Amino acid sequence: MMNESPSIRIGNGYDIHRLIKGRNLIIGGVKLQHPDDLGLDGHSDADVLIHSIMDALLGALSLGDIGKYFPPSDNNWKNADSLFLLSQVIQMIRNQGWEVINIDSVIVAERPKIKPYVELMKKNISTTLRIDDGLIGIKATTNEKLGPEGREEGISCHSVALIRKK
């Protein structure tokens, strides 16, 4: 066991939510329009991008996952704005003396097209985290009609966060 904690840590995050009728499609704090009027199902606003980033940040410090802090059994988080939840997570990270070096995310969805919204998503995240939007990478890809994303049953996101001790 090491006596000294490393001054740089990396965390990995993943989230997936089912697409359903009757819900807003919110990704990166942006309300998108799905061609079939589908949205993501979840206890909060089901923002897969923000949820995967939160899990990456928490994972970098071995703090568990978002379910530990914002459980679906707690009605305080019903339909919660995930950007608000992210603001709580970054406060935990900063309270332990860490800061974000960068975040990189990949959204997996057949539709709608994500690229037109990437800059607004980056702005929402950078504003919430109080970091330069140049430290945030957001990419989107399809799953080539394979798996739940390819069958348009859901949308997923993978994120990596690199943090350093202040």
Image: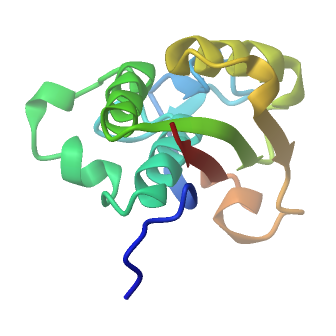
Camera-side residue: 76 or 136? Answer: 136
User: Image point 57% across, 46% down: which residue?
Assistant: 164
Q: Is residue 57 above or below residue 28?
A: below
Identity of the residue furthest to the bottom in this view: 1
The coloring applied to the image is: rainbow
Residue 83 x, y percent position in the rendering: 45, 21
User: Image point 55% across, 55% down: which residue?
Assistant: 7
Camera-side residue: 98 or 161? Answer: 98
Q: In the drawing, does residue 152 fall left or right of residue 77?
A: right
Snapshot quadrant of residue 35: top right
Snapshot quadrant of residue 41: top left
Residue 104 x, y percent position in the rendering: 74, 45
Q: In the drawing, does residue 112 fall left or right of residue 63?
A: right
Residue 68 x, y percent position in the rendering: 21, 53
User: Image point 45% across, 26% down: which residue?
Assistant: 23
User: Image point 77% across, 60% down: which residue?
Assistant: 150
